[in-house]
Structures are given as structure tokens and as C-alpha cells.
Image: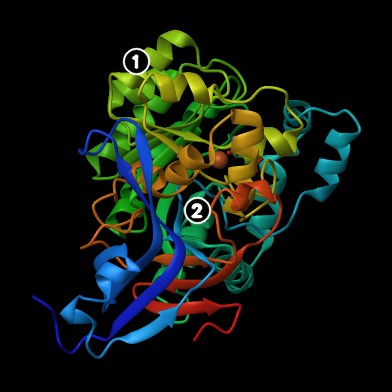
């Protein structure tokens, strides 16, 4: 059945149409990528009606009355689902970047009061309105680089009022008809111990569990809760308590796990049945096997290793070969990964994680959707799913990571509407 009132869009003549899928045809496990040559997609309203070779779709009677969009010589794929970002912050930290280039470590900068605590100081001093203006720009940049959905974390407030301020900025943008980027909010009050709680950290964990999580959940300001489980930040025991509290308030669970040391975060993610364990630079073989036996997605953020100048990257090949569902995300934040560009992440995933363009593209779309448990609606072009499509100015999708650091996006379609058009497509 078709809804005859909804506008229909016929995107056709794509040199390649990309559709990621789960190899075992059920959600979870390894991903693959179907590449349809001379491909087309028929969209009705905000949904995908059909995909296939252009010649075959041209015979579809539902084409009648549709608007034609000829994308000759272009690749078309699902929008990126960037499942791990920290987009609400008040200022950049380029001075710390320069210090790291000159030899300082991320940990030593953090221990001296910089790092996340630096961002907390500037965020607390910023008005909600100024944060909204800045984050709105970030949203536009995400879309312009082919990302149609992001997960967005709080975590630079670290007190009730400022964590709420961040989540309200996100909530405002979620409900703003001028913003087409879809945003999935995550509460990350447990991102760091704030300055005023350094000598009574237990009290901060109490505050997160007893005040922040109940308030955030009651106001429906978050869908997930995340914790930075790391030596010197939140222990496994503290992380377990925080995430179990979040779960009891109806939030999904995520973890920053094994990023700087083998902290035990991955094991905790499996124990709790979290949606994803993120980073995993220091995961070991035993925890890889644990992940493979679970439905926890491994979200890899190689932009963070790259920007930190680290030699240590997550063992992507081992994770893939063990059958773990791998997602790729930017980790967009002012400290370790200040980019919104998922195309650049595909390049780093290729060169430093040894993920093929096929693996990387699937991880950055359907993998990200799975990490948000939204794979029934997002992440691929399967008929019935939301019509979130990106048109790239290349004839072969492997050119996207190959020409690194560039923006190949020509147009973006979100929920069936053209929301970004760089090359006068319409
Ligand atoms: O994912 N590891 C914790 N959080 C961020 C960094 C945040 C920051 O430095 O501001 C990350 O890398
Ligand atoms: Fe992060």
C-alpha cells in the first residue's frame, strides 16, 4: 500500500547504491555491504519504498507522479549514524593540542586540571543561548558531511544545573524544525570527577545516582546513560552502580571502556548488557571473546587515537574476525577528536584499523544504528526504513576514504526531504 498524499522521490542512475546488512540476516554479528550498480531508490514521505537497479525500478508503477532526482556519476548511501559524540561545549582546546604535540600527555594535562575539567569550567560560565548557537552550527556541519543522526552526550557540566543545561540545549535542537539532524541524547554526568568533589568522590557518585539520573529520566532528557570507566576516573564498581541506577530509570547503557588502560569496562558492558562498549584501545583477547558472545556493539573511535598522536588503536581486525558488531563514530569533542567528519573516520579506519572501505562504511551506518538500538529504522536503505540518504560526488564508494580529509557530500536527504544541497541537485 502507498500513501497517495505523501510526495514521492525517485533517486536514480546512481553509479553505486550502498546498502549495509547483517550477514546472518538478524541484528547482531558481522556486517556486509550490498553494492547495487546503476542503483535507484524510491522514497515516499519519510520512508524508503524500494531500492534496486534503476532499470528495474523504472518499471515500478509507484513511480507515477514522483519527483525525479538524477544522480548520475554519484554514489548514494544511507546517512552516517554517528553513535558517539560530545557536541555541546563552550570552547575549543587547541592550546592542549599544541601542548600534546610538544610532548605533554592527555593524562598529565588532565591531572593538572586541564582536559575535561577545562571544558567544564568554560561550559559552566556559558549561557544556554550561546551553547545553543554553537551546537546548532555543529549540527549543520554534521549534516553537511553526510551524517543524518548523532548520539549526543552531556558531560561537561558535572553538576545538576549544568548537566541539565546541556541536555536542554540538545532537547531544544531535537524539537527545532529548523534543525534536520536527528539527535539521540545521552546523559554522561559520570564523565569526570568535578573540581569541587576531588576529595570526596563518593559524594559525586551519590549525586549522579540520587539526583541527576532521576531528574534527567523524569524530564525525558536522555535515552542512554554513559560512564567514563577508566583508571583515575570512574572505577568498575562506581560505573556498575551508576549504570544500574540508570537502567532502573529506563535509560539504555553505554560505556567509555578500555580507552587509556585495560580498565575492565568492556567486561562490565557485557555483564550489564549495555548497548555498546566504546573506544576499546586496550581491550584484550579474553574480552574480545566475551563481546563476541554478547549483543554489545564495539564502537571504535579511531579519530581519538589519531588526534592524540597515539600509537595504540583498537584491535578492529580481531573484533571483526571474532564476529563482533563493530560501529565507527567520530567521538566529536574538544579534547580528543574535534571533527564531525565521518568520511575522515573511514580513512583512519582504513589506514590505522585495517578496516576495508566495505567494513568501515557498514560500521559507520548500520553499525552506528545498532549501537543506538535503532537499526530497525536507521542505518540502511532497506524498504520500510527512514529515508536518510547521502549523495556523494564520487563514482566508487572506495574513493570516499581514499581521498582522505575531503568532503565528498553533494546532497543530503533526511526523512525524505533534501536538507543539504551542495551541487544544485534539485
Ligand atoms: O571520548 N574519554 C572521555 N571522553 C572523551 C574525551 C573528552 C575530552 O577530552 O573532553 C573521549 O575521548
Ligand atoms: Fe567519548
Q: Which corner quadrant of the figure contains ligand 2?
A: top right
Residue 305 at what x, y percent from top left? Answer: 67, 32
Asked if residue 26 lies left or right of residue 140, the reply is left
Question: Which residue is pictured at 57% across the width and 18% down the height?
Answer: 282
- Report crowding for label 2: few under 14, some 14 to 19, many 20 or more residues within 10 A (C-alpha): many
Residue, disc 1: 290
Colour scheme: rainbow
Q: Nearer the viewer, residue 93 or 141?
A: 141
Q: Is residue 407 above or below residue 63?
A: above
Q: CA distance from mark 1 to mark 2?
A: 33 Å
Q: Could you say whether the residue bearing mark 2 is in a helix, strand or loop?
A: helix
Q: Is residue 346 visible?
A: yes
Q: Is residue 192 above or below residue 124?
A: above
**Residue at far front of view:** 55
- Report crowding for label 1: few under 14, some 14 to 19, many 20 or more residues within 10 A (C-alpha): some
Give the quadrant of residue 242: top left
Q: Nearer the viewer, residue 107 or 198?
A: 107
Question: Which residue is pictured at 34% across the width and 76% down the height?
Answer: 416
Q: Nearer the viewer, mark 1 or mark 2?
A: 1
The answer to the question of whether label 1 and label 2 lie on touching residues, with beta carbons closer than 8 A, is: no
Q: Nearer the viewer, residue 248 or 42?
A: 42
Give the quadrant of residue 349: top right
Question: Which residue is pictured at 30% across the width and 20% down the height?
Answer: 271
Q: Could you say whether the residue bearing mark 1 is in a helix, strand or loop?
A: helix
Q: Count how many numbered circles sit on residues in the image.
A: 2
Asked if residue 208 lies left or right of residue 27, the reply is right
Residue, disc 2: 163
**Residue at far left of view:** 1
Question: Which residue is pictured at 43% across the width and 25% down the height?
Answer: 320
Residue 19 at what x, y percent from top left? Answer: 36, 52
Amino acid at each position: 500500500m502507498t500513501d497517495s498524499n505523501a510526495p514521492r522521490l525517485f533517486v536514480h542512475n546512481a553509479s553505486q547504491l550502498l546498502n549495509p546488512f547483517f550477514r546472518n540476516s538478524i541484528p547482531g554479528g558481522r556486517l556486509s555491504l550490498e553494492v547495487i550498480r546503476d542503483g535507484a531508490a524510491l522514497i515516499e514521505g519519510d520512508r524508503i519504498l524500494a531500492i534496486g537497479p534503476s532499470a528495474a525500478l523504472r518499471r515500478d508503477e509507484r513511480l507515477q507522479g514522483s519527483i525525479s532526482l538524477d544522480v548520475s556519476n554519484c554514489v548514494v548511501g544511507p546517512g552516517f549514524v554517528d553513535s558517539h559524540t560530545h557536541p555541546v561545549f563552550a570552547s575549543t582546546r587547541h592550546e592542549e593540542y599544541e601542548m600534546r604535540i610538544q610532548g605533554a600527555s592527555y593524562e598529565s594535562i588532565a591531572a593538572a586540571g586541564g582536559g575535561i575539567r577545562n571544558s567544564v569550567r568554560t561550559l559552566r560560565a556559558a549561557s544556554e543561548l550561546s551553547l545553543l548557537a554553537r551546537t546548532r552550527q555543529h549540527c549543520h556541519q554534521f549534516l553537511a558531511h553526510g551524517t543524518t543522526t548523532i548520539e549526543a552526550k552531556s558531560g561537561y557540566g558535572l553538576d545538576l544545573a549544568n548537566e541539565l543545561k546541556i541536555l536542554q540545549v540538545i532537547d531544544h535542537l531535537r524539537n527545532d524544525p529548523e534543525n534536520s539532524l536527528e539527535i539521540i541524547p545521552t546523559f554522561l554526568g559520570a564523565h569526570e570527577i568535578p573540581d569541587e568533589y576531588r576529595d570526596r568522590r563518593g559524594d559525586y557518585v551519590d549525586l549522579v545516582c540520587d539526583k541527576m539520573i532521576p531528574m534527567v529520566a523524569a524530564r525525558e532528557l536522555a535515552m542512554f546513560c554513559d560512564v567514563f570507566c577508566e583508571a583515575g576516573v570512574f572505577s568498575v564498581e562506581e560505573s556498575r552502580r551508576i549504570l544500574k541506577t540508570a537502567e532502573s530509570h529506563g535509560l539504555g547503557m553505554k560505556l567509555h571502556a578500555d580507552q587509556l588502560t585495560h580498565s575492565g569496562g568492556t567486561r562490565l558492558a557485557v555483564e550489564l548488557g549495555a548497548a555498546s562498549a566504546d573506544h576499546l584501545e586496550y581491550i584484550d583477547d579474553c574480552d574480545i571473546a566475551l563481546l563476541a558472545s554478547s549483543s554489545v556493539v564495539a564502537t571504535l573511535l579511531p579519530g581519538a587515537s589519531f588526534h592524540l598522536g597515539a600509537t595504540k588503536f583498537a584491535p578492529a581486525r580481531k573484533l571483526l574476525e571474532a564476529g563482533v558488531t563493530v560501529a565507527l563514530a567520530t567521538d566529536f569533542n574538544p579534547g580528543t577528536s574535534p571533527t564531525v567528519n565521518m568520511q575522515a573516520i573511514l580513512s583512519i579506519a582504513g589506514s590505522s584499523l585495517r578496516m576495508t572501505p566495505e567494513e568501515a562504511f557498514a560500521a559507520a551506518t548500520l553499525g552506528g544504528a545498532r549501537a543506538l538500538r535503532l537499526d530497525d529504522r536507521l542505518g540502511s536503505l532497506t524498504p520500510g526504513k527512514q529515508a536518510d540518504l547521502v549523495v556523494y560526488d564520487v563514482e566508487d564508494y572506495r574513493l570516499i576514504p581514499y581521498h582522505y580529509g575531503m568532503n565528498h557530500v553533494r546532497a543530503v536527504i533526511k526523512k525524505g526531504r533534501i536538507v543539504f544541497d551542495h551541487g544544485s541537485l534539485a
